[in-house]
Amino acid sequence: MSLIFYLFLALAALSVLVFFHELGHFTAARLMGVTVERFSIGFGRILSRWHCCGTEWAFSAIPLGGYVKMKGQDDSDPTLRSSDPDSYNAKKPWQRIIILLAGPLANFVVAFFLYLIIALHGAPLIAARDYIPPVVGQVAPETPAAKAGLKPGDRILAVDGHPVRYWYQIGEAIQQAPEPILLSIERNGHQLLLKLPTKVVEAENEFRQKIQRRIIGISPAVKRDAVIRFSPSEALFYAWNETKKASLLIARGVEKMSTGEVGTENVGGPITIFDVMMKFAREGFIYLLFITALISVNLGVLNLLPIPALDGGHIMFNLYEMITRHEPSETAYYRLTLLGWFILGGIMFLGLYNDFHRLLGGAHG
């Protein structure tokens, strides 16, 4: 299929995420009695619009986001105020916080259901590598596992008394268990106990940082084209665990980048996002769902950052008002909002710079 088709799929998937994010804000605003003047998918010049239920619904020219314009609230004019009872800033701070939280929350809910669909369908290995059965496929020679007598086909039942259901739990338990570790395994229908030391090796974490990791020298029994099947209860666990894991991973990534532990060259712009989504779309619809779920979590986490002009920044303003019993001064609010836009503009420029740098690097490589 053509490049245009996959670009359309990626754009459609991203638009769906934006729609549900803004729908979260819209729904909470309406529940709080706030008039929503416009619901737009995209920014910039409006291409088409229609009116329904007291709101203008629109598609705009730049399809890289969206917004809901509530009465009395406008990021392009942060000094805008309205004393009408159906305006955003006429509501109590806790009500505004609920409205602001509803957008990111919608992204987490969407991600959860996308992961749930993936699990109920049958997850490809890239989406469920951690959830393969804890059955030994290979034992590396001259490792603690080989010396202790572990064999291919052994099923690991527990590590130091902690039950193991999925392969990833083996690695987690090994890192925490005292030396030597105690493995409970099943072999040919019989349960055995093996006591063995671990070996410390240098490895890379999710952020390509060098770390010390304890291993015993085993790898799972799985094929590249394997599809992981889940029962309904296992699918719910998978969806919850993947949503939580992705959220924590992205939050840690932001923290490490802000402290300089991870380089800013890892920041991707819209070109990288669309490129990754198109690559996954080419592999199949279930792959597209997987990357869409990850991006949905990304949107939820990043929108909660305490940067003015993002949901997290507005939440901070409202928390300040709840604690001090008065709003920030108009001057402070205006300047902090401009600072927020400056920061976002810088991040966007950095992402685009990295995008073009990767493209040029690939072209010359």
Image: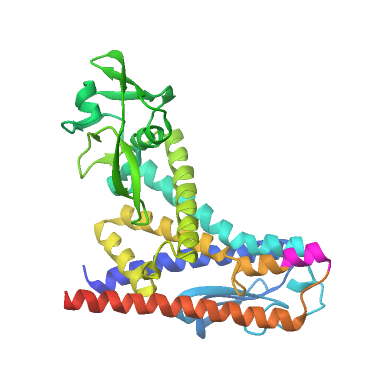
Foreground of the two, 139 or 272:
139
In-front residue for pair 168/198? 198
In the rendered image, residue 171, in percent from the top left (x then y), is placed at 35, 36
Task: In the rendered view, tell whether residue 327 sits above or below residue 180.
Answer: below
Q: Quadrant of the C terminus?
A: bottom left
Give the magenta range.
318-325
Number of callouts: 0
Horizontally, residue 343 falls left or right of residue 128, namely: right
Q: Does 322 appear in magenta?
A: yes
- Identify the residue shown where x is 29% and y is 68%: 6
Residue 287, compared with residue 167, is above or below; it is below
Image-quadrant location for residue 156: top left
The answer to whether one can see residue 187 in this image is yes
Question: Image quadrant for the N terminus?
Answer: bottom left
User: On the image, which quarter does residue 186 sit in?
Assistant: top left
Q: Residue 54 is drawn in which quadrant?
A: bottom right
Image coordinates for residue 88, horizontal then vertical, percent: 73, 72
Q: Residue furthest top?
A: 190
Q: Is residue 233 left or right of residue 183?
A: right
Q: Residue at x 49, y 55 (%)?
A: 110
Q: Inspect this view and state whether residue 122 appears.
A: no
Residue ID at (34%, 58%): 288
Give the percent coordinates (x, y) of residue 350.
Answer: 41, 77
Q: Is residue 279 left or right of residue 311?
A: left
Q: What color scheme is it?
A: rainbow
